[in-house]
Amino acid sequence: MPTHAMAYSRGVTLVDYGTEVENEIVKLQQVIENNSGLTERYNTRWLAIKLLEEDSDIAEKMSALENSVALMAQVQESISHLADVYGDDVDTVIADRRYGWINGLVRETVQRSDKERINLSDRIDTIVTNRVLGIPIFLAMMWIVFKVTTDVAGPFLDWMDGVIGGPVTNWVVSILETIGLGGTWVESLFVDGIIAGVGGVLVFVPVLMSLYLALAILEDSGYMARAAFVMDRLMHALGLHGKSFLPMIVGFGCTVPALYATRTLENEDDRILTGLLVPFMSCGARLPVYVLFASIFFPENTGGVIFILYLMGIITAILLGIVMKRTVFKGKQQSPFVMELPPYRMPTLRGIWFHMWERTGGFVRKAWTLIMATSVVIWFLLAIPLGGGGSFADSDVDSSLFAGVSRAIAPAFQPLGFGEWEASGSLITGFVAKEVVVGSMAQVYGVEEGEEETEATTFFEDVGEIITSFFGATWDTVKSIPLIVGIDLFEGEEEAEPTALMAAVEDAFEASSGGHGALAAFAFLAFTLLYTPCMVAVAAAKQELGTKWMWVSVIGQLVLAWVAAFIIFQGGKLLGLG
């Protein structure tokens, strides 16, 4: 070490940064040598390199000196020239050369045993983090996750729907009849309000559990750290770096903690830009909406449609990031990204269960609090008649207060293919929480359906049916696993019948779109993907980004969602799609 230090002080170049960089270093040294005060305090080559690396502490000290205008002007000229030559940050180019020199020094001086070999993690990383194969592998992983989420969890979704719409509803009705409240507004509140709203959302708990299960496996195995590393180069195109991708990964679970995760970014511009892009990562709350509509209108390719939606959110964030980098955040400094990749590990059952249940538990807790409160409010608005037609909780849904408010904004969605008041009203409630969109539809369409005649059953018969149907759903799940890779081992099996809600939604979208139901449904999904997130996320955005950027996010996403849905529906009609 002392030998190296002496050689450096005598002007011997230990690290060769390449012809272009060395030329700029010499130019800066010449300017620095004109200032005797600097040559007395600093090694001129070291100072020139630090200025090219845009070291904030050194740059601040130099800017504070008298007669530093010429020096700082040469610094900016050199940095701009090198950025044009290499198409990358100067500090990144210098770091690459420096580590290349270190690697060469190690090869020259360190003797390795012939028995030493690359470990398994390194071998896997040569493929997984490959600059060409890395992103396709990441997309393939995400596609598998959504195939598992939709195809494997589908039977349990049907099982939950049957349990909530059958035995649970029957038990609540029986209890109310026992205490003399059968047929009253109280029964309507429980059945058409709480069970229809909350139950319509809880039906999708198996789907969310399978999503969180797949993500937990990827996280515990160490792959998600590789995903951030792989995305670093792509994130640079947005004026960000791989560290910004970590909050975006969190955003696939929930937007709120993802916004709080932007605190880990030191640069304020990085934090604001990342916070503006995070809501475009589809949170788990949107998944029930995706599954419902994809199952109705794209039953043969449900997982593929959901994968496209998630990919659409990522692409939208990338495009917006590039635009904002060249406009609002033009000229902002990029921060370096350094991370240590953990070794691959076999995920533990305890760790997977903890991550899966923690996230699913948060969803369930929201169902019993925020979603329940919203469902009661929606039921109340549905129960209030307009124009004196009918009485409280005993009037046609079309003449309710909720329908009246929804009709007022429905014309804005007519060009998008879903101008019926039911869809418009559901999107309004989506501002509270995206899961409520499904719950609202379950309430609106469920209230309109007549009471179905069902055979009376005892409590123990219902319990027996629940257990029997659970094992049936488990067997259906096992049978669906080969379908992930396109293998159907049980051809000829009958497909599940669509629920009353699915049939009602399909009829409504076919009618409102003039026979282009699938196209209108995809436009609806795009709108759900892109429009303003839930109120809790908006509050988090205000806290983390400030009031100004919060309103930019809220209004901007709403406008973008409408434009995107309009292009999808109207463009699709022109092309004869849907």
Image (tube, rainbow, N blue to C red):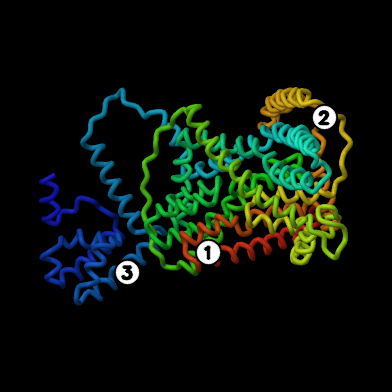
Q: Which residue occupies the foreground of this view, 148 or 43? A: 148
Residue 340 in the figure: left or right of residue 180: left
Q: Mark 3 and mark 2 in contact (Cβ < 8 Å)?
A: no
Of the residues shown, which amino acid type is indicated by label 2? Answer: Glu
SS at circle 2:
loop
Q: Residue at point 51% right, 61% down? A: 322
What residue is pinned by disc 2?
A: 494
Of the residues shown, which amino acid type is indicated by label 1? Answer: Met
Q: Earlier in the sequence, mark 1 or mark 3?
A: 3
**Distance Cα–Cα, label 2 vs label 3:** 69 Å
Residue 285 in the figure: left or right of residue 187: left
Q: Is residue 482 above or below residue 55?
A: above
Is any atom of residue 12 visible in this view? Answer: yes
Q: Nearer the viewer, mark 2 or mark 1?
A: 1
Q: Position of residue 575 (x, y in %)?
A: 78, 58
Mark 1 crowd level (few <14, some 14–19, many ≥20, 10 Å Cα): many
**Distance Cα–Cα, label 2 vs label 1:** 49 Å
Q: Position of residue 107 (x, y in %)?
A: 26, 37
Q: Earlier in the sequence, mark 2 or mark 1?
A: 2
Quadrant, the N terminus: top left
What residue is pinned by disc 3?
A: 76
What residue is pinned by disc 1?
A: 550
Q: Mark 1 and mark 2 in contact (Cβ < 8 Å)?
A: no
Residue 117, image quadrant: top left
Which numbered marker is on residue 282? none
